[in-house]
Amino acid sequence: MLQSLAGSSCVRLVEQHRSAWCFALLVLGYLLYLVFGAVVFSSVELPYEDLLRQELGKLKQRFLEEHACLSEQQLEQFLMRVLEASNYGVSVLSNASGNWNWDFTSSLFFASTVLSTTGYGHTVPLSDGGKAFCIIYSVIGIPFTLLFLTAVVQRIIVYVTRRPVLYFHIRWGFSKQIVAIIHAMLLGFITVSCFFLIPAAIFSVLEDDWNFLESFYFCFISLSTIGLGDYVPGEGYNQKFRELYKIGITCYLLLGLVAMLVVLETFCELHELKKFRKLFYVKKDKEEDQVHIMEHDQLSFSSISDQAASMKDDQKANEPFVTSQSPTSNDSSLNN
């Protein structure tokens, strides 16, 4: 008896705070996912980092042995200056001296990465004025870009998602939920093919040092706005048609970002995902909803009564003027 009462009370408690429990599980799952990513990255990348450190140490020691006139301190000062310049996108290598980072096409590519929050980091402002302008430009440009992308996606999704789903639902009588799921999967496959697989094959041909995996990696890192900056197209030695290539990459990034947002919005409109998201949202109290409804009804009733009173006043004002007789004169005429 006591166990059944305790079990029913626990079930009732869980049901009453279901959203809070789901949110707690969501936070716990996200933290575990972060830890899982850290463990995997550390176990995979740490051995490669150790090998690279050993290789660089041996190379440095061999260089100092071959150039006895150069001290280790002088070499480290030179390397520090070279690495500092490399962080700003300037290289001392002879095969990279012909590529300017701040010509018009490169600046256009940089502006697109800033506004789309991709930010590869291979090219950064050098001057204080450039850094200050980048802050102001981003503060205005990033919300402007979000507004622009939202408006574009809102118009595209009507013709790409909602109308096709509604057409198959009304014309052929299929279930709207099933049609929406099939349509979302088909749209996702087309987007992956057109903005990931095909561009990856093109980049693997145009970029000498990239294979297909590295090209696909660049496409995903770019269109997901992660932008690590370890792979940037158009930075190779004697890149043919570099200006046109940079403009094409800029267009690809913008179109790909729009396509990604359309696909995400399409999946977010699925009924199953909407139900799943509601598990983690805070539910409104019924009393608050009733108060909002009553306030809305009172406002609407008062507005209607005010409109009726104003209409009556307007009708009276538009009526022809008629002299009104006093009640005493009416009574005297009746007596006569």
Image (cartoon, helix red, strand yellow):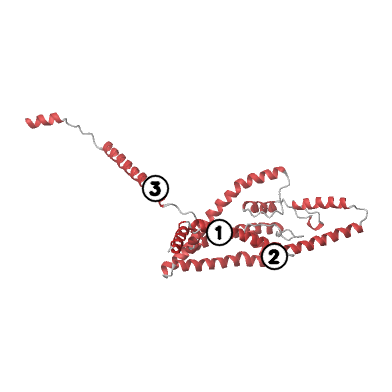
Which quadrant holds residue 66? bottom right
Q: How many marks?
A: 3
- Residue 141 in view in this figure: yes
**Mark 2: few/some/many CA within 10 Å (<14, 14-19, 20+):** some
| Secondary structure found at label 2 | helix
Which quadrant holds residue 231? bottom right
x, y percent for residue 4: 44, 64
Q: Left or right: where does residue 334 sit relative to residue 97?
A: left
Location of mark 2 (residue)? 214
Label at residue 26:
1
Confirm or deny contact between disc 1 and disc 2 (CB under 8 A): no
Confirm or deny contact between disc 2 and disc 3 (CB under 8 A): no
Viewer-nearest of discs 2 and 3: 3
Of the residues under marks 1 and 2, which one precedes in the sequence? 1
Nearest the camera: 317 or 280? 280
Q: Left or right: where does residue 203 sit relative to residue 71?
A: left
The residue positioned 48% from the left and 66% from the top of the image is 180
The residue positioned 67% from the left and 60% from the top of the image is 38
